[in-house]
Image (cartoon, grey):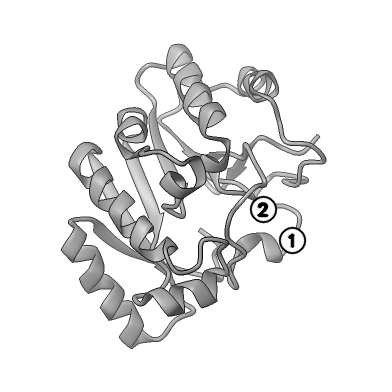
Amino acid sequence: MADIVYTLGSGVYLNITNKCPCNCAFCIRTKGDAVGDAENLWFDEEPSLDEIKKAIDDFDFSSLGQAVFCGYGEPTNAYDNLVSSARYIKEINPSIKFRLNTNGLSDLINGKPTAKELSGVFDVISVSLNEPISEQYDKITRNKFAGKAFDAMLDFTRECVKYCPKVRMTVVDVISDEDIEKCREICNSVGAEFKVRSFAKGR
């Protein structure tokens, strides 16, 4: 069984699925089988909610300040388990804050609007913007929704901004400085914060 809860630096992360509609050229999971203190983040079979809960029970969340849902897959690909496991941790520690690291394609993945419900569960939603133009976005993310993914991601982010206390969009520093500035402008236009992530650091 792969690691579900792992630490990286001072952060605590939950890896609940390996499924993802993207195969990003810069994805951290292409660099190895695990990060942080995890031994392996690849599942032989996708974890059930009971298995996720057991991993939560085996880790001390009782006084933890923050946890991040981010592993070797897109968390919203396990949407029901994502929401249920976050709420389960809240029962253990009502004051904990959650961040969701997502590609922003949840509505396409799940075939329904999801931003409002996710914003009611997560204190911070971090959306991977990656590129400023749809064609470039499709090329670097190699997603299965090519042609509509970019606009869906932006629409999802706009909806999150309406409901979530903090929404940010990120790019990885593998693109040009010019494209980073274009992404910053897009981020500003949807009302989210902007962050440039380091490929070398992996988060």
Is residue 11 visible to the viewer in this orientation of the structure? no
Q: Residue at x 72, y 46 (%)?
A: 41
Instruction: Compare residues 19 and 123 and report the one nearer the observer.
Output: 19
Calculate the distance from the C-alpha at mark 1 to the C-alpha at mark 2.
Answer: 8 Å
**Residue 172: x and y, percent?**
45, 70
- Left or right of 86? Residue 29 is right
Q: Is residue 64 above or below residue 75?
A: above
Is residue 153 visible to the viewer in this orientation of the structure? yes
Residue 193 badge: none
Q: Residue at x 79, y 37 (%)?
A: 45
Q: Is mark 2 on a helix, strand or loop?
A: loop
Which of the 4 image quadrants contains residue 176?
bottom left
Instruction: Compare residues 182 and 114 and report the one nearer the observer.
Output: 114
The answer to whether marks 1 and 2 mark residues whose Cβ atoms lie closer than 8 Å is yes
Tell me the quadrant of the picture where the N terminus can be found.
top right
Q: Which residue is drawn at 71% across and 44% down?
A: 38
Q: Residue at x 45, y 20 (%)?
A: 87
Q: Is residue 132 above or below residue 65?
A: below
**Residue 190: x and y, percent?**
20, 59
| Residue that carries the numbered disc 1 in the rendered image | 32
Which of the 4 image quadrants contains residue 27?
bottom right
Which of the 4 image quadrants contains residue 30?
bottom right
Q: Which amino acid does label 1 sit on?
A: Gly
Q: Callout 1: few (<14), some (14-19), or many (20+) C-alpha neighbours within 10 Å?
A: few
| Residue that carries the numbered disc 2 in the rendered image | 35
Q: What residue type is labelled 2?
A: Val
Q: Callout 2: few (<14), some (14-19), or many (20+) C-alpha neighbours within 10 Å?
A: some
- Left or right of 91? Residue 178 is left
Q: What element carries label 1?
A: loop
